[in-house]
Amino acid sequence: MKRLPLAAVMAAFFVFLVWFVSVRQAVLFLIGIGMGSVLAGARFGFTTGWRRLIEQRDPSGVLAQLFLLALAAAVSIPLLAAFPTDLAAALGPPSISLLVGAFVFGAAMQVADGCGSGTLYKAGMGTPLNMAILPVFALGSFLGSAQLDQWLQLGAVKPVGLVAEYGPLQALLLTLGGLAVLGVAAVLWSGKSARWFDRKLLIGAVLLAVLAVLNLVVAGQPWGVVYGFGLWFGKIATVAGVFDPATNPFWSQPVNMANLSQSVFMDVTSITNIGILAGALYIAARKSSSKPSKPLTGTQWVVGIVAGFLLGYSSRLAFGCNIGAMVSGISTGSLHGWIWVPMAFLGSLIGVRVRRHFQF
């Protein structure tokens, strides 16, 4: 689709949201478009940044991600402290579920060549594997949420929010200090001769930080991705009569029951996900922006799709992906984000080797 008719469709959908849903959801759609455009335009891949650090000793992608986290935290943490009843942090309980989920997710995202946001924007750009992964990602996310209570019974403690525990100043200093430590570790891992910064990625980091903060302010909650996937499949399963949410500990929660019963356009995560797809599709509409994908073998398709399912399942166990757990978790002062990162990186060390074995 060319850009002009695509822009017309996006504008019409925006008007539809304003008229029939709400102004807030329409604004969140625009924020999602911005996210998708930046992710696709800057090729801001969280998965790729980690893989380049591991395989090529190139820290530029990871340093750009840390810059994004620092900028988002510098604004989000004071906002959370100033408006505690209006804004919520992305909190998740430290648990066995978190440890296992983050590790598996880190491995699977390298094989599937995309995390939650990466799968979205690459599907929007028409990458065949990511387009095929998207529905199985949704299936995995739904099943992971449906079984989450069983995983939490293995061991979990209450979520820890740094803002509530230490106040905004100490929470921000702890967050920035932790990010600085990770940055130094990435540079030391890479060596003195490595290129530290990539201008396009740094610009992308600034824009994504601004959009993440806008999402927090408009939605009242941090940027998320995987909940929307699980909700989409949960709606299908419920309508099909193969799933009764009232009997499930996760989906029987009032907010989740309400999301299942109302229009998907009312869900803040779903509407930004739709925006990300639209924004990436708009970028892909430029003829020079997309290159033909390398054909995959049957084995590569199977391995990639299995990895996509594991992405969805493990992301629910880990209370988010690179966006929900890392970006939103750390930038809003959640302890679980700091547990997620090292476990996911350990998983990525395995994942890049699996990816290399199957010659992706």
Image: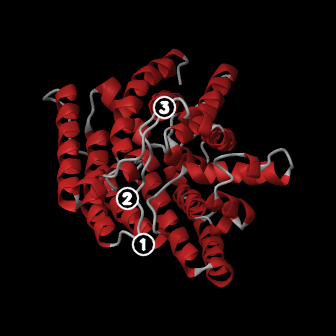
Q: Which mark is residue 155?
A: 3
Residue 296 visible in the displayed image: no
Q: Position of residue 146 (x, y in %)?
A: 67, 42
Mark pair 1, 2: CA separation: 22 Å
Whether 330 is drawn above or below 148: the answer is below
Residue drawn at the location 68% of the way across and 64% of the way down: 258
- Which residue position holds label 2? 208
Mark pair 3, 2: CA separation: 34 Å
Residue drawn at the location 60% of the way across and 39% of the way down: 149
- Which residue position holds label 1? 86
Question: Is 155 left, or right, of 214 in this rendering?
Answer: right
Q: Secondary structure at mark 2?
A: helix
Q: How many marks?
A: 3
Residue drawn at the location 34% of the way across and 60% of the way down: 209
Q: Residue furthest left?
A: 192
* First in sequence: mark 1 vs mark 3: 1
Which callout, 1 or 3, points to the residue nearer the camera? 3
Amino acid residing under circle 2: Leu
* First in sequence: mark 1 vs mark 2: 1
